[in-house]
Amino acid sequence: MAKQKAKLFLDSTAWEQFRKEYESSDDRSCALLCAAYLDNCLEILVLEALAHREEAYKGLFLDMRPLGTFSAKIKIAFCLNIIPKSFYDDLNIVRNIRNAFAHQLHGLKFSAAPICSWCDNLMLPIDYSESSGYMIDDTCGRDPRQKFIFTTAILSSLFEDYYLERARNINSTLMAVEPKFE
């Protein structure tokens, strides 16, 4: 089996290309691309938090392993206290949206039920606008696709900065605790 390459966050040039791709794509591709990037980000965060990363990666993250799914990564990131409950909830909404697009063969749009109502339940845009004084309606209006894109972009940005540092602090704490056998 070939050795898997470590996953990385996108640099600014790659991010700009990725943004153009998902913004110009159809609704299904947009949902799948944005969710896939958050899945990648969560894997990076969880790996950063865990001791013995190489062993964790081989034993936990590959296909058909305990942390091989988006759902499992969301749960472990929350249980390790890497992400707050509001992110956990929004990530599960993103996962539900991704799953709906992935499993319905045709005709699904962000404006369709239940996708539209799930997008209305995303809390990060509301929390972000309240804390920054920025009005979410200025960017997204009532457009569920734009609210989804805004949420996934803010989540990934926070993951690459504050929450990456948080994961590394968890790792430092884990590494400082040496098991003692008597």
Image (cartoon, rainbow, N blue to C red):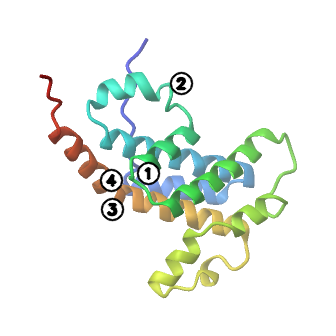
Marks 4 and 3 sit apart, C-alpha to C-alpha, by 6 Å
Task: Give the amino acid type for the residue marked by disc 2 in the picture.
Answer: Asp
Q: Position of residue 171 (x, y in %)?
A: 25, 44
Q: Between disc 2 and disc 1, whose residue precedes?
A: 1
Which image quadrant: the N terminus?
top left
Q: How many marks?
A: 4
| x 45%, y 55%: residue | 15
Q: Dot 2: within a 10 Å radius of its alpha carbon, few (fewer than 14), some, or many (20 or more) residues?
A: few
Label of residue 162 in the image: 3
Where, by quadrant of the figure, is residue 36 drawn? Answer: top right
Depth check: give the residue in front, 6 or 55: 55
Q: Which residue is mark 2?
A: 63
Q: Between disc 3 and disc 2, whose residue precedes?
A: 2
Q: Is residue 28 above or below residue 179?
A: below
Q: Dot 1: within a 10 Å radius of its alpha carbon, few (fewer than 14), some, or many (20 or more) residues?
A: few
Q: Between disc 4 and disc 1, whose residue precedes?
A: 1
Marks 4 and 2 sit apart, C-alpha to C-alpha, by 23 Å
Q: Is residue 155 visible?
A: yes
| x 70%, y 52%: residue | 97
Marks 3 and 1 sit apart, C-alpha to C-alpha, by 20 Å
Q: Which residue is mark 4?
A: 164
Task: Give the amino acid type for the residue marked by disc 3 in the picture.
Answer: Tyr
Task: Give the amino acid type for the residue marked by disc 1 in the picture.
Answer: Ala
